[in-house]
Image: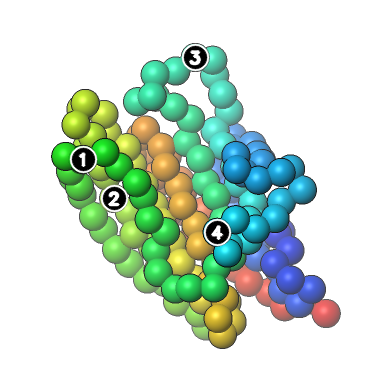
């Protein structure tokens, strides 16, 4: 389990997919911070195994705090098609984590797999998660990581 401090009163614990390594957010300094009104919490990436094509790029999982409800959004080129969509919710410690898993088919034939989640923490605060990868296996691992999440209060 990896404990992530969310505030002085709570910690989130979750099982990170096997082999994933902690990484900094690509748009924030290593010390963390806020971007677009959301606060970066943590990110992980599959180990880099050398040069890859965009279709085989390493999977990533990121978490952040937000002041608005709703799934994270994904940008995609015109003519991108949604090949699949599955949505569920799970009661985690009295709060419902909503998770959606979907596959996008890009115009060049590349497939990308996503899992996004949103979890209410307190009034006006949500934890959001996004995973993207080139395989269904990585998406399953991300869903399992989100399902393992537990929030605990600390004094």
25 with respect to 83 (left or right): right
Colouring style: rainbow
Quadrant assignment, res 48: top right
Cα–Cα gap, marks 4 and 3: 31 Å
| Residue 59 location (% of width, % of height) | 47, 36
Sequence order check, earlier mark of 4 and 1? 4
Near mark 4 (Cα within 10 A), the count class, few <14, some 14-19 or many ≥20, is: few
Q: Tell me if label 4 and label 3 are in contact, CB under 8 Å.
A: no
| Residue 102 location (% of width, % of height) | 28, 50
For the residues carrying marks 3 and 1, which lies nearer the camera in this image? 1
70 with respect to 104 (left or right): right
Can you tell which mark lies on residue 106?
A: none
Near mark 2 (Cα within 10 A), the count class, few <14, some 14-19 or many ≥20, is: some
Near mark 1 (Cα within 10 A), the count class, few <14, some 14-19 or many ≥20, is: few
Cα–Cα gap, marks 4 and 2: 24 Å
**SS label for mark 2:** strand
Q: Residue at x 50, y 57 (%)?
A: 129
Residue behind mark 1: 78
Cα–Cα gap, marks 2 and 3: 26 Å
**SS label for mark 3:** loop
Can you tell which mark lies on residue 51?
A: 3
Q: Residue at x 60, y 39 (%)?
A: 26
Cα–Cα gap, marks 3 and 1: 27 Å
Residue reaching furthest to the front:
36
For the residues carrying marks 4 and 3, which lies nearer the camera in this image? 4
Residue behind mark 4: 36
Sequence order check, earlier mark of 2 and 3? 3
């Amino acid at each position: 389990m990896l404990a992530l401090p969310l505030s002085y009163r709570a910690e989130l614990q979750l099982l990170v997919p096997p082999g994933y390594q902690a990484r900094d957010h690509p748009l924030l300094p290593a010390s963390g911070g806020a971007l677009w009104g959301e606060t970066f919490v943590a990110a992980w990436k599959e180990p880099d195994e050398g040069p890859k094509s965009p279709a085989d790029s390493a999977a990533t999982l990121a978490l952040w705090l937000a002041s608005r409800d709703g799934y994270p959004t994904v940008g995609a080129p015109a003519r991108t098609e949604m090949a699949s969509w599955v949505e569920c919710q799970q009661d985690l410690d009295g709060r419902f984590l909503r998770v959606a898993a979907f596959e996008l088919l890009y115009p060049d034939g590349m497939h990308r797999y996503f899992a996004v989640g949103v979890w209410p923490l307190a009034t006006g605060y949500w934890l959001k998660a996004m995973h993207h990868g080139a395989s269904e296996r990585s998406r399953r691992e991300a869903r399992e990581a989100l399902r393992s999440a537990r929030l605990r209060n600390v004094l």
